Image (cartoon, grey):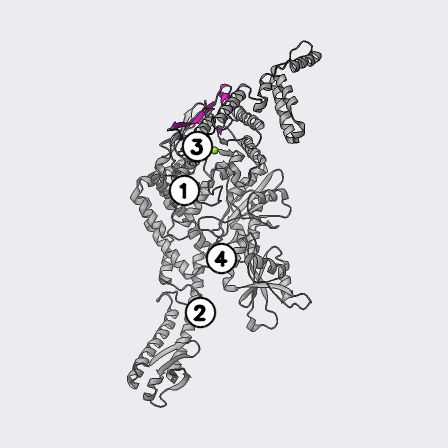
Amino acid sequence: MIQQYLRVKADYQDAFLFFRLGDFYEMFFEDAVKASQELEITLTSRDGGSKDRIPMCGVPYHAAPNYIEQLINKGYKVAICEQVEDPKHTKGVVKREVVQLITPGTVMEGKGLSDKQNNFLTTLSDFGDETFGLAFADLSTGEIHTTIISGPEQQLLNEVYSIGAKEVVVDENFPSHITQMLKERMVVTFSYEQSTEIPPEFSRIADKLEQEKLLISVGRLLNYLIRTQKRSLEHLQPAKFYELDRTMKIDLFSKRNLELTETIRSKGKKGSLLWLLDQTVTAMGGRLLKQWVDRPLVNKQEIEARLELVEVLLKEYFTRQEIRELLKEVYDLERLAGRVAFGNVNARDLVQLRKSLSQIPALKGEIKKLPILTDSVLENMDECTELTGLLQDSLIEQPALSVKEGNMMKDGFHGELDKYRDARRNGKTWIAELEKRERELTGIRSLKIGYNRIFGYYIEITKANLATLPEGRYERKQTLANAERYVTEELKEKETLILEAEEKIVALEYELFLKLREEVKVYIPRLQKLAKAVSEIDVLQCFATISEERHYTKPIFNDERRVHIKDGRHPVVEKVMDSNEYVPNDCWMDKENEMLLITGPNMSGKSTYMRQVALTAILAQIGCFVPATEASLPIFDQIFTRIGAADDLISGQSTFMVEMLEARNAIVYATQNSLILFDEIGRGTSTYDGMALAQALIEYIHDKIGAKTLFSTHYHELTTLDQALDKLKNIHVSVVEQNGKVVFLHKMKEGPADKSYGIHVAELAELPKELITRAQVILEQLEAEPDSRPTPDTEKHMVNESADPLTQLSFFEVNEERHGSEKMSKVETQAIEKLRKMDLLDTTPLDALNKLYEIQKLLKIKK
Ligand code: ADP
Ligand code: MG
């Protein structure tokens, strides 16, 4: 058996092999050691013939799904190896085979598969020249999407992140630096598949694909699924080609920063935009909502089509409520179709399907009532009337959970089944009559007829009544402590009849059920289409519901690249706080005002304001109303957000390199139709290069890109940039002092913030008066000479009177020697002063470099 194990295991090196032994799945060797740790189960060992015992651990087969799920959630794969022969009929070792390889990207059931989230298995193919093929499938719903990505690897990473792939399949030559990058950014399991040929029986899936590269991507995906799942995959839908340009691009950093589908802090849905929006009623709708949030549209017509439906659904309150009620009874048709194909639905699932389908006519009736043309929506809502009829005729209301115990089919559905059921019923009636008759004849009122699996039917007489039982009336069968059990010839005969009928019923019902399931299979494509239409209506009603509840406004789109938001709010912050407290703000940007430079103290609401603009644009482009009283927007092709490293400590990525990488992403790809949010960029490094970079970034975007940009900064110095950059406007968050306390009004105003504000706050906080005065002195000094560092108080005299006669003299002398009569400038004097004062023994190389940089910068300015 161990030899057999080793043979099988050789083919599944990267998976835990669950090796079926009777009622257990056993694991051996390294698998056992690792599994015992991961699953916290006992590690034992068994004699393997040699001197070392073989490590082993096991889980009961009925508890296996739970353990498998734990391993899959940790990113492992599990190969299920079953006995494929009946041990009763074999000599020697029973034949065993792997029947399924379960992997993170191919989970079909359990908690690993959340209702409102797709689980996409993704494949990547490298075609060279920065061209990649990508395909992904949700095995549980059968949908397959594919595209080609050309250009920098970053785009590929963005897309894989968007998809939220848990497992990525590549060939062995796929560039390892890309797999490495993916592993660093997300939790993902890698798998390998070399075959890319589309198997003939799956040609329908690739029918519509025209490019060879797409066929290769989808081919790899199919081959991997076939190799791992080893069963019917009839529910897989024709692969759909999608173009990246048909949706707004939001790179992975921006998605995280904007907390579209999960929060930065907890990585959970709660607190994200998706969480706020989710008023979907069905699981399918929930999944589609996530897809829509992940991919806002860029086509005005498509967006407006959604908005129009949302508008009527919002206005028609009662119809919408009806629709919501009806949707509540609609089961997850998409995943159900998948499980029908997979062969793991039971009769209860099919009853749910029947229930779901019977809602459709009413649902269509409600949609028809909407005062808008809904033909295209209705067209796709196929009631599958024949299927409903079939399920109606065949299945009872509450069938058994198991498909192998009968009790599923309706009377009248199948003649032979009815016959057996009659026989069983008659037998049982006969027994009930026998009981009544024997009670009368014997006069023993407690006489009863019972049944158990081992002894079958029996007549039971309590010990107390034995004396009155005529001798030899029944045949003794079993003696209990306080009763005797008997049988009669006739009872035995009836018992055989009943049991035979019972056995036949169970077998026949199972057979009929399988047949029914096959018949349902034929409807899979129609069910999938219906599922799509239902989920769309669900998401649209969700938009209407949330828009009404939170008083959102229908956005309009302009072609003048103008942003006009009146009384805008941050949708999530507003919801989380008492909505009355949230202070709405306008946002106005057009061709003359492309950039807003936002200043204001900490915690005044700069970041919130910037994000609310981005979220408003995203909501508009997914077809939802927006949190404002008026909104006219351009259609953005891309959104970039970058939060300065100091604000981003939580995500554990607070390196300046990451900050710059992300900034680069925006600078390289943004167009004049993009929206850029730079929030306190430059924080992650020293003041001087931070400020220098911030200014350079602003200038670059202003001159070379022209994207709509919101730039918040703590470098007050940058507020003078509006003099040189004509499309840049200063705005700030206003703050007032009330009864000696600082009050953040969270209100945006034109112009730069009051710069001495920080010291003012310190004063209000009652720091020592002396300290405050000193701070004011330093501030004045800094303002007078922005590039000089104020000197410690004790040296104040020396600094201020740098006209120490001696020093001054020698400077002039040196100067004269070198440059003749040219007098040394103030800047140069400063530079030399800086050099002179450096305490080299107390300077690290990095400090020295920073100092040098400052000095050089001083001198460059002069030039
Ligand atoms: P900053 O970026 O200026 O430091 P934030 O945008 O992080 O400030 O806002 C700080 C806090 O102020 C937020 O967590 C929120 O609770 C509150 N806040 C921000 N904007 C508003 C607003 N418009 N109305 C009410 N409260 C707000
Ligand atoms: Mg902030």
**Which mark is nearer the camera, 1 or 3?**
3
Q: Could you tell whether 459 is left or right of 781 in the image? A: left
Kindly identify which residue carries mark 1. 276
User: What range is drawn magenta here?
Assistant: 710-737
Report the Cα–Cα distance between label 4 and label 2. 21 Å
Foreground pick, 262 / 382:
262
- Within 10 Å of disc 3 (Cα), the crowding (few <14, some 14-19, many 20+) is many
Label 4 vs 3, first from the N-terminus: 4
Report the Cα–Cα distance between label 3 and label 2. 69 Å
Kindly identify which residue carries mark 2. 507
Kindly identify which residue carries mark 4. 342
Residue 246 location (% of width, % of height): 48, 37
Q: SS at mark 4?
A: helix
Pointer 1 with pointer 4, Cβ within 8 A = no
Report the Cα–Cα distance between label 4 and label 3. 52 Å
Query: What amino acid is at disc 1?
Result: Leu
**Residue at x 44% of width, y 47% of height:** 287
Report the Cα–Cα distance between label 1 and label 2. 50 Å
Label 1 vs 2, first from the N-terminus: 1
For residue 740, which numbered disc appears in the image?
A: none
**Residue at x 43% of width, y 59% of height:** 519
Q: Residue furthest bottom?
A: 471
User: For ligand 1, which image quadrant applies?
Assistant: top left
Q: Could you tell whether 52 is left or right of 550 in the image? A: right
- Within 10 Å of disc 2 (Cα), the crowding (few <14, some 14-19, many 20+) is some
Ligand 1 closer than 8 Å to label 1 CB: no
